[in-house]
Image: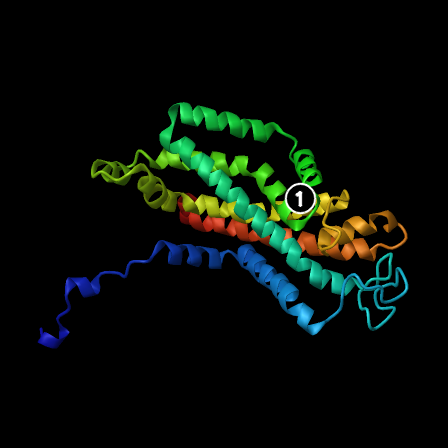
Amino acid sequence: MPANQVTSPASQAPEAISPLREAWTVFRRNKPAMFGLALLCAIIAFVVYGTFLYSGDPFDIVWAPHAMPGEEAAFPLGTDYLGRDLLAGLLTGGGPTLAVGAVAAFITVIIGIAVGALAGYFGGWVDDLLMRITEFFQVLPALLFAMVLVTLFSPSLVTIALAIGVVSWPQTARLTRAEFLKIRELEYVTAARSIGARNNRIMWKVILPNALPPLIVSATLTIGVAILFEAGLSFLGLGDPNTMSWGLMIGSNRSYIIEAWWPVTFPGVAIFLTVFAVSLVGDGLNDAFNPKLRER
């Protein structure tokens, strides 16, 4: 065989595929998940760039109350009970709504991972104590507890996000605990412990990176739950009255839904589409990161 045709075994070995790349390949083949991702990107683009294309203060009274969609060309979606532009409200209110969902999910994940990691890694009395605290928060009526917190600290986007995060972390804590209990006995964790690695390093740099996939899925789904939570609080009159959000639009117009359906329907559809898109993305991530589902 000529020298220039000789190939080494290393050159013939198949190229290794990284776990993230493999997960993206599985996610990309999931048509509902890709549709959800496209829809979520479209909603974010609508919120981010829409205010530049359609300027207007959502609190300004610009026309007669309850003008129907299409009745006045300057206000394509009509007006609410005060005569405020609904399209301006949708564009401006989307940012705070998505921000509350993201911040609340972040708080939920931080508290849940901290509690679950400590309980799952150390076990014993630490596990018993933290799980009793988790069960206490889990049996509390979440919406009622959030209402109490928001009322005590005055309604604002910050207090709403904090309240949602405080009442939503137990599920993430239980999931994190289960992952740590499963991973802490594996060989590479035992090897790290045998060479003298400290507990902090083992927990956060050895175990946590391998426990992240299901936690990422949980965090994604928590965003949708937080958005619904914010809408529910605003519907009950506990939203921030100084910041426009989709939940505030529904809450302030709920008394007039029989007379005019559009001030409630349009923000309601926006919330539904956002939560629907987040749920599809979360299901797709679950399939992509779950080895059993990926093989199937």
The N terminus - image quarter: bottom left
Classify residue 17 as left or right of residue 52.
Answer: left
Q: x, y (%) of residue 198? A: 28, 38
Residue marked by disc 1 = 229
Q: Residues within 10 Å of mark 1 (few under 14, many from 20)?
A: many
Write the residue at 74% across / 44% down.
238
Observer-nearest residue: 241 or 18? 241
Does residue 276 appear in the picture of this structure? no
Write the residue at 72% across / 47% down.
239
Q: Quadrant of residue 205?
A: top left
Q: Which type of secondary structure does the marked residue at label 1 adopt?
A: helix
Identity, as a three-letter code, of the amino acid under mark 1: Phe
Q: x, y (%) of residue 128? A: 45, 24
Classify residue 264 as left or right of residue 177.
Answer: right
Write the residue at 66% across / 31% down.
141
Classify residue 190 as left or right of residue 251.
Answer: left
**In the rendered image, the vertical position of residue 6 relative to residue 244, given as above or below:** below
